[in-house]
């Protein structure tokens, strides 16, 4: 494959594609835009912005620095006080695995100079709107119960905040800028709203990890966030051996040789590149590998070594009929500390009847899972 092949770095409307083209070309990066309606270009949608593959890391750095230019009016990204630093959101339920998620999230925030929002949501059990108003009268006892739920949520957050501050004072957690937020609502909805408001680089969530049944995947908050989030999500199982990011020695990236993964790899390295670890690229397939797969893997390895020379990189092919079993065996054999993969949005019917490998890995492994949404 040619090193100068064109890849799609983003898809925008015609107007935004022209802005991106001008911005990148002003930095010396040649740009080609495609899928333009030549008769009426201003009404064209889904315009691809394509650049040379070798320019990708530089281009992503430029776009990240100017991301406010490309927000849609309804995106809701309103970083407080014009704070341009990166942001991490950590949803918690005050469990031990929530604290473990904070431990890892704080480490990452410290390395990438990010602020953190620790978010807790609680649900008030309102009665359905469909019931006649005469049947939904809320008495004093119910009102007191609702008040108690709210007060308890804030009390627990206060105690959790004190625990985090004590850990920072003891040197168990890095001293970073963080805030706590308590919201009433459905957890996955409030996480999505918070993400739109602060535009995080990462969401870190503690999970119960290994032992859950496939039927329990439906309705899982973590699974719902993975499906809806437009930013990377790191799921941290309660029984993971990874307590701090300094424990990371080997990280794996699952590849299917899609060119959009190059953008995901850059995201992966921006989040974890400051830590000391080796990378293993792995491709899972039902039968033994063929020549085309080997060439693609060699190209991926060459690309990674060129752009991230400080990291040691190895590649593996795993032939397996059972993908979940193959992933778990690979993790054990290679001593993988974090598994990373890309995911694409799927319909509700697909999620109901065929939970993705990312969903299943959340509850069938004690290894943290980083899920990066694939760019269109």
Image: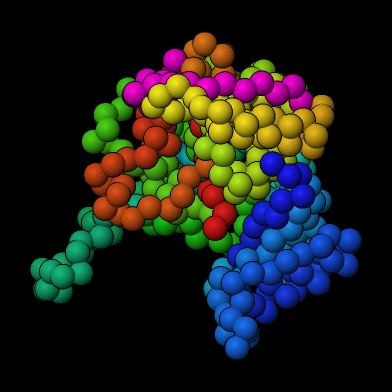
In x, y percent, where is residue 330?
A: 49, 17
Coloration of the structure image: rainbow
Q: From the viewer's perspective, is 177 left or right of 147?
A: right
Residue at the top extreme?
A: 333
Q: From the viewer's perspective, is 77 left or right of 327?
A: right
Above or below 332: residue 125: below
Q: How many marks?
A: 0
Above or below 80: residue 116: above
In x, y percent, where is residue 325?
A: 37, 20
Residue drawn at point x = 53 percent, y = 54 percent? 230
Residue 362 sits in quarter: top left
Q: Nearer the viewer, residue 111 or 251?
A: 251
Picture quarter with the C terminus: bottom right
Residue 320 part of the magenta segment = yes
Q: Which residues are magenta?
A: 311-329
Residue at the bottom extreme?
A: 40
Above or below 343: residue 195: below
Residue at the front extreme?
A: 291
Residue drawn at point x = 50 percent, y = 60 percent? 193
Q: From the viewer's perspective, is 167 left or right of 308?
A: left
Residue drawn at point x = 55 percent, y = 76 percent? 45
Residue 30 part of the magenta segment = no
In x, y percent, where is residue 354?
A: 28, 42
Q: Nearer the viewer, residue 137 or 177?
A: 177
Residue drawn at point x = 23 percent, y = 36 percent? 215
């Amino acid at each position: 494959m040619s090193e100068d092949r064109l890849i799609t770095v983003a898809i925008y409307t015609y107007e935004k594609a022209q802005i991106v083209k001008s911005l990148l070309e002003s930095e010396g990066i040649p740009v080609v835009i495609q899928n333009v309606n030549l008769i009426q270009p201003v009404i064209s949608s889904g315009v691809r912005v394509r650049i040379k593959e070798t320019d990708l890391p530089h281009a992503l750095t430029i776009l990240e620095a100017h991301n406010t230019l490309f927000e849609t009016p309804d995106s809701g990204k309103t970083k407080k006080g014009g704070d341009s630093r990166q942001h991490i959101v950590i949803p918690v339920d005050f469990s031990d695995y929530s604290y473990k998620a904070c431990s890892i999230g704080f480490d990452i925030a410290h390395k990438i100079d990010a602020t953190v929002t620790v978010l807790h949501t609680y649900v008030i059990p309102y009665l359905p709107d469909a019931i006649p108003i005469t049947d939904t009268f809320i008495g004093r006892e119910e009102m007191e119960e609702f008040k108690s739920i709210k007060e308890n949520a804030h009390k627990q957050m206060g105690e959790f905040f004190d625990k985090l501050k004590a850990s920072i004072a003891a040197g168990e957690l890095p001293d970073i800028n963080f805030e706590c937020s308590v919201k009433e609502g459905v957890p996955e909805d409030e996480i999505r709203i918070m993400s739109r408001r602060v535009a995080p680089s990462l969401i870190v969530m503690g999970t119960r990890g290994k032992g859950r049944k496939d039927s329990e995947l439906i309705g899982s908050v973590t699974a719902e966030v993975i499906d809806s989030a437009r930013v990377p999500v790191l799921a941290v199982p309660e029984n993971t051996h990874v307590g701090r990011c300094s424990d990371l020695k080997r990280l794996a990236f699952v590849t299917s040789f899609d060119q959009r993964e190059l953008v995901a790899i850059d995201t992966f390295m921006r989040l974890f590149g400051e830590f000391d670890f080796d990378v293993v690229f792995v491709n899972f397939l039902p039968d033994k590998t063929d020549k085309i797969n080997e060439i693609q893997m060699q190209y991926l390895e060459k690309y990674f070594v060129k752009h991230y020379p400080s990291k040691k990189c190895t590649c593996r092919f795993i032939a397996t009929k059972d993908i979940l079993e193959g992933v778990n065996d690979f993790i054990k054999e290679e001593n993988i500390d974090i598994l990373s993969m890309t995911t694409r949005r799927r319909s509700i019917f697909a999620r109901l009847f065929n939970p993705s490998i990312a969903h299943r890995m959340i509850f069938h492994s004690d290894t943290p899972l980083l899920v990066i949404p694939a760019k269109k």
